[in-house]
Image (cartoon, grey):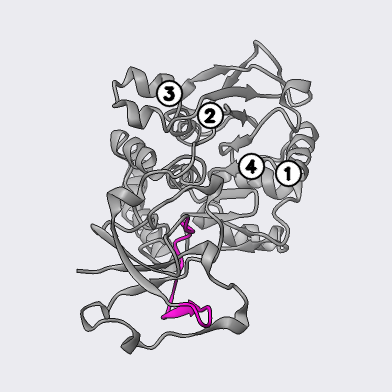
């Protein structure tokens, strides 16, 4: 059985001087192969108790100096590192995952106010990710006849759609779908303080956003609003200048261009989604689902997140790509070569 070793956030010292290597002999022989989870990296949002986000084993093992109160959920592992407190005994405590997936304090019921920024013609599949956010709304959970304990973990969600044409105008997306806008970028109802999240689905790759969009994104960034960009939505973020100095990503095949055009950001082509401060961004198209899944884990309890992902059949896959960028490029090149004979045949026939 593989167990996760975790630490009590409130009862450890986080000073680097207190950290030392934990020898394998510290652990009972039957636990010597377990992984140590570095639980002091960050405080759990809203003082909630979460299991490790990517742990699917039936139990978790905690090292603690007192009864565990709250733990970091951040999925980062170290090689047997432990923040120790001198003269205080450490206790090994095993909990079933289903106990750790409950909250220890009341979850906020404050509505999550989401503004979807539609910059030109956006990709419909990018935009669809907003529905995963709305699925935490108690009205949706009730309509799905979920058990009350899960409904109680929900949070009301309001969504507005922002575009340059303004209220009542229709904004085109791919697949000939149009949405009715609710606000313009200069509307007071969508300024900093009125929204918790700005979601930016991807526009056409050649898009250069108008000043109204960039000003709104900059203002929300300065106010600490959570900014979520999906696919080419990162172009809006980059043009606004808010990716400078931050860990960021975008469509994998566009990363070389992004590195050249916006060198101030730390571009990562190894992950489907990344998070740095109030900026969250994803790779291409359906990587937006991975992004929203990652974001949901910071605003609602894990049982509800897993329920929503299960209901929508969104795979809980690794954020790390399975292949290297070079492999992906060769794959697409091979598809071009396969398509070439058909094109030549048609040109000859014409």
Q: Which residue is mark 1?
A: 221
Element carrying mark 3: helix
Q: Do the residues bearing badges 2 and 1 touch, measured as CB atoms within 8 Å? A: no
Specify whether residue 222 is painted magenta: no
Q: Is residue 206 above or below residue 30?
A: above
Specify whether residue 81 is painted magenta: yes
Q: Do the residues bearing badges 1 and 3 touch, measured as CB atoms within 8 Å? A: no
Q: Residues within 10 Å of mark 4 (few under 14, many from 20)?
A: some
Q: Which mark is residue 138?
A: 3
Segment colored magenta: 70-88
Give me the residue at 43% from left, 42% from top.
301
Give me the residue at 38% from left, 88% from top.
23
Q: Which residue is mark 2?
A: 109
What is the magenta segment's predominant secondary structure?
A: loop
Quadrant (top left, top right, bottom left, bottom right) of the N terminus: bottom left
Quadrant (top left, top right, bottom left, bottom right) of the C terminus: top left
Quick one: label 1 or label 3, which is nearer the N terminus?
3
Which of pointers 2 and 4 indicates the residue nearer the eye? 2
Q: Quadrant of residue 189?
A: top right
Element carrying mark 4: strand
Quick one: label 2 or label 3, which is nearer the N terminus?
2
Q: Which residue is mark 4?
A: 226
Q: Answer left or right for 117 relative to 189.
A: left
Measure how far apart labels 2 and 3 are at the Cα level.
10 Å
Q: Position of residue 284 (x, y in %)?
A: 48, 48
Q: Examine the rendering and report whether any part of residue 256 can be seen.
A: yes
């Amino acid at each position: 059985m593989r167990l996760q070793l975790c630490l009590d956030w409130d009862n450890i010292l986080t000073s680097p001087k207190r950290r030392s290597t934990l020898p394998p002999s510290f652990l009972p022989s039957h636990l010597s192969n377990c992984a140590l989870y570095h639980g002091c990296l960050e405080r759990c949002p809203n003082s909630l108790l979460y299991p490790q986000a990517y742990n699917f084993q039936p139990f978790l093992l905690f090292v603690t100096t007192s009864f565990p109160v709250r733990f970091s959920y951040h999925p980062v592992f170290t090689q047997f590192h432990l923040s120790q407190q001198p003269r205080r005994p450490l206790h090994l405590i095993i909990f079933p995952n289903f106990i750790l997936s409950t909250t220890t304090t009341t979850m906020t019921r404050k509505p999550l106010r989401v503004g979807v920024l539609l910059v030109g013609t956006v990709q419909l599949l990018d935009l669809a990710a907003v529905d995963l956010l709305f699925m935490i709304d108690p009205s949706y959970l009730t309509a799905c006849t979920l058990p009350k304990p899960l409904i109680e973990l929900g949070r009301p969600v309001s969504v507005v759609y922002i575009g340059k044409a303004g209220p009542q105008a229709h904004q085109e997306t791919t697949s000939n779908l149009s949405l009715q806008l609710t606000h313009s970028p200069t509307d007071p109802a969508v300024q900093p303080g009125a929204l918790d999240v700005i979601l930016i689905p991807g526009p056409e790759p050649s898009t250069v956003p108008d000043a109204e969009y960039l000003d709104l994104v900059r203002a929300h960034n300065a106010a600490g609003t959570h900014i979520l960009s999906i696919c080419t939505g990162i172009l809006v973020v980059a043009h606004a200048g808010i990716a400078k100095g931050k860990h960021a990503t975008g469509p994998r095949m566009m990363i070389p261009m992004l590195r050249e055009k916006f060198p101030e950001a730390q571009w990562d082509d190894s992950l489907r989604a990344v998070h740095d401060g109030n900026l969250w961004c994803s790779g291409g198209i359906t990587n937006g689902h991975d992004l929203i899944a990652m974001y949901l884990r910071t605003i609602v309890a894990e049982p509800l997140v897993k329920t929503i992902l299960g209901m929508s059949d969104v795979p809980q896959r690794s954020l790390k790509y399975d292949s290297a960028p070079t492999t992906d490029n060769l794959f697409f090149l091979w598809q071009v070569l396969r398509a070439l004979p058909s094109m030549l045949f048609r040109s000859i026939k014409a």
